Image (cartoon, rainbow, N blue to C red):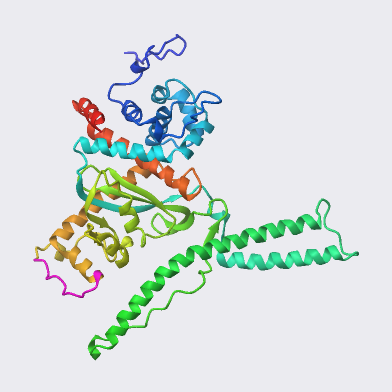
Amino acid sequence: MSTRFVSVDRQSPILMPPSLQEWLPEAHIARFIVEIAEGLPLSAFKVNWKGTGSAQFPPSMMLALLVYCYATGRFSSRIIEDATYTDVAVRFISGDTHPDHDTICAFRRENRHAFRQAFVKVLAIAGQSGLVRKVGGISVDGTKIKANASKHAAVSYERAGQLIERLALEVEQLERKAEEADSVPLDDGLSIGEEIVRRQDRKASLERARQVIEERYEQERRTAQQEYEKKMAEREAKRKQPKGKRPRGKDPKPPPETPPGNRQHNFTDPQSSIMKAGNGKHFEQAYNAQAGVDTEGSMMILGCRVSVNPNDKEELEPTVSSVESSARTPSYILADSGFFSEQQVAAVQGNGGPTVYAATGKKKHGRTVADLEKREDSPAPPEGTSLTERMRHRLSTREGREKYKARKYTVEPVFGIIKQAMNFRQFHLRGHPKVESEWQLVCLAYNFRRLFTLTVGPGGRGFFRKAVARA
């Protein structure tokens, strides 16, 4: 019996369907994205209202193009431009037009407001569809994402000081050489004046870097000083109590007045920072991308922001505040131990705010036999107990344990999908405002994927259109 193969004919002319509507299946995410993007008002976009110059690409099309490409793991403006020729779904979105990479990059850079409005619109549709409840929990977390800058283009505070001293000495030597008539000349092509200017410019750049490091550190130092004073006040209060209750160990040390020598400044993207990444065993030039995720089943991102801080100690309240109020009134907040700070928890819970469930320390994975045993909740701590002790008790209760478990299957998978399925591991823009705009776009693309998964299916398309009309 002879082997048979499918006939592959690359020579015979084949025409694509004459209608763009026939290029894609009815239940395709590209259609889904276009339908929502076209519902946004034109005022959301940055447009040349004068109408001068070449004709502009429709803003809703540009938004749909970016969202679809980000949702499918294409982030470079050149790759997106190429996809308008080679990808049928992208050609459908662009109407078989081809914006160049400069146009794509400028739209991405200048339309943060449109990304935010689209983000709100998607959440409104999810609410109208019954997927996102108005009241419920939020799980917050952060992940390190590489900046568009190399960590080798950075200088530490200590090293910058050493280089400033060396450059000042070299400028002094060059100035003396210029005054000496019989001094040894420089190599061919080099001039003393140019070498002095080059060193002075480099010295000024390093001085600015040290100043930025000092300004950033001063903000941290104020917070650390408050924590130090609070701890010292608690220890002084204990010293006045009977001997058995006096504080143990050494007193904490106040934060130093000057930044640690290893604090760094990056010349390519000064607002990014060196941060521990992955399992904490290596460092990257990165930003701290934050998200607040629905815990009530939808796994939609309800709020997002980007921090320049390498840890999450000061990020709980700002990340909770980033949650879109029209989509969710939070009743409780879940966070890991990296977010726990008495000051931040108090800021979230104050004035009738949501209850926070945040681990006060790291806990080993897995459960012991004692963890499996049924037990009654321990009595609540007495009045005057520290917030840390009350939080430990809250997480030890049956209700606290059940709620806190939701964190690992809500927010953590979201970051996994963004990094693994969408393959977003590095920002393409520079500077904190632009990076935050790109993170908004990433979270918007994720929400489109998620909403598409939850609404489009047998009988789901019509229900989705009703929700779009109501939102």
Asked whether residue 346 is drawn in magenta, I would say no
- Bounds of the magenta span? 376-387
Q: Position of residue 85 (x, y in %)?
A: 47, 23
Residue ID at (86%, 65%)? 179
Q: Is residue 261 left or right of residue 186?
A: left
Residue 444 vs 352, above or below: the answer is: above
Relative horizontal placement of residue 284, taking residue 326 as reference (left or right) = right
Viewer-proximal residue among 381 and 422: 381
Quadrant of image for the N terminus: top left
The quadrant of the rendering that contains the C terminus is top left
Q: Is residue 380 magenta?
A: yes
Residue 11's place in the image compared with 321, above or below, is above
- Percent of width and height locating residue 223: 40, 68
Q: Position of residue 104 (x, y in %)?
A: 49, 32
The tally of labels here is 0
Residue 427 versus residue 385 in the image, above or below: above
Magenta: main secondary structure = loop
Q: Is residue 202 above or below residue 91?
A: below
Identity of the residue drawn at 58% across and 60% down: 209
Left or right, 104 with reference to 451: right
Q: Between residue 176 and residue 47, name the one nearer to us.
A: 47
Q: Quadrant of residue 400?
A: bottom left
Q: Evaluate whether residue 247 shows in this view.
A: no
- Asked if residue 430 shows in the view, the reply is yes
Identify which residue, 164 or 249, lies in the foreground: 164
Position of residue 383 measured from the top left corner of the image (x, y, whole percent):
17, 74
